[in-house]
Amino acid sequence: MNRRNFVRLAGGGAVLGASASLAGCSSELPPEAIAPWRGPAADTADVRHWILSHAILAPHSHNLQSWLVDLRQSGEITLYCDLTRLLPETDPLSRQIMMSHGTFLELLDIAARQKGLRADITLFPQGEFGPVALDQRPVARIRLSADAAVQPDPLFAQILRRHTNREAYAMREPSPEALRAIAASVAPHPVRTGFVGTGQPELMQRHRAIAMQAWRIELVTPRTIMESFKVLRVGPREIAEHRDGLTINTPMVRALAALGLFDRSKAPAPDDTATTGQIKDFNAKIAATPAFFWMVTEGNGRATQVNAGRAYVRAQLAATALGLAMQPLSQALQEYPEQARPYADIHALLEAPPPRYTVQMWARLGFAPQVGPSPRRGVQAHLIKT
């Protein structure tokens, strides 16, 4: 929103009145929206519910939580994708959605191990999706069985602590030992990892330039920014009602929304303060990022995408254990036409020429103040009840 238009339309009294009505309001999320982060009860009757209570805390693109599970077969979990929760504009090939199913499966596997259960995961038991569209076939079938040889995964302790951190990072580079631990954490999955830090200033500048360009493209492309607006939840009521998507709970934005001055029905112009302010804020964070992390796969089939998601959440859990923050930089990896140049640039920079190779993840990495969790809908919302 253009700030001058806001002042003219709202007037000082209206702004002050709205701000006063929010005096003392907390920007913390409603308790019901983040209740799943407290973890399940130890005496949960069906161990699958206990396991799923951890799996639903996995990171997901735009926090859509597009996981559906069928528990009708005893001792099994069948995972489907909710086809109403996709990102056709920014993720037209649903690569990120498949990665988000991989993050779910990895946390499921880790939680099962905590209960002494082996999770035998069969991907795409009725056949793999094609390269463009998803369908109603299952993503995975998981058979659970007791196995005395199963060892707990030390990353389990980080599941309730893992949060994506979009704040400013301190200009302190992670230690070589920390980077090695993160790289080692993904060993169960076939991905190539890499890091770059402040000791390589020219490379860092190239990474930063690509990230800034890709972020600007997403903000000034109307259909892609509108995709984010559609899942934007503003204020406690919307956040508690949906418990998904992208959340804003700061008093000023709530004041604007209450006055009808935060218009989510149309994309802001490229030169609007709303757009230029976000670009400036993002660029400042990128300029101060001390390290970047990435994952590359050979091939880009659906199973590869799922396994890349499994690897990524392990890397983030490992980073959490080391006191490090991580934020995916998804824009340059997205396959819509406007991102063709950043997509080509990041693949070239990381020596991953497509179509043989695909950069599945690229993320900021560093130290930052702790942030709270994002909303979750709870296990019941993901169960197929027919």
Image (cartoon, grey):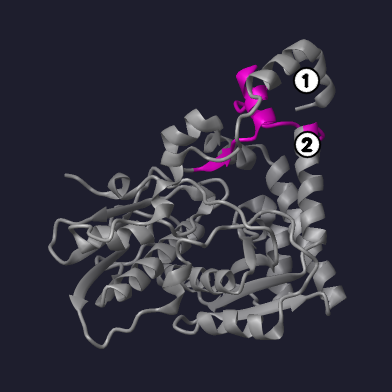
Residue at 80% in and 33% down: 273
Residue at 68% in and 58% down: 369
Task: Please provide percent x and percent y for residue 192.
Answer: 58, 81
Tag count: 2
The residue identified by callout 2 is: 270
* Secondary structure state at the residue bearing disc 2: loop
Q: Camera-side residue: 171 or 207?
A: 171
Which residue ends up furthest to the front in the rendered image? Answer: 24
The residue identified by callout 1 is: 6
Which residue ends up furthest to the right in the rendered image? Answer: 202
Task: Please provide percent x and percent y for residue 371.
Answer: 61, 53
Nearer to us: label 1 or label 2: 1
Q: Camera-side residue: 273 or 155?
A: 155
Residue 138 seen in render: no
Task: Please provide percent x and percent y for residue 113.
Answer: 31, 76
Q: Earlier in the sequence, mark 1 or mark 2?
A: 1
| Above or below for 240 versus 367 | above
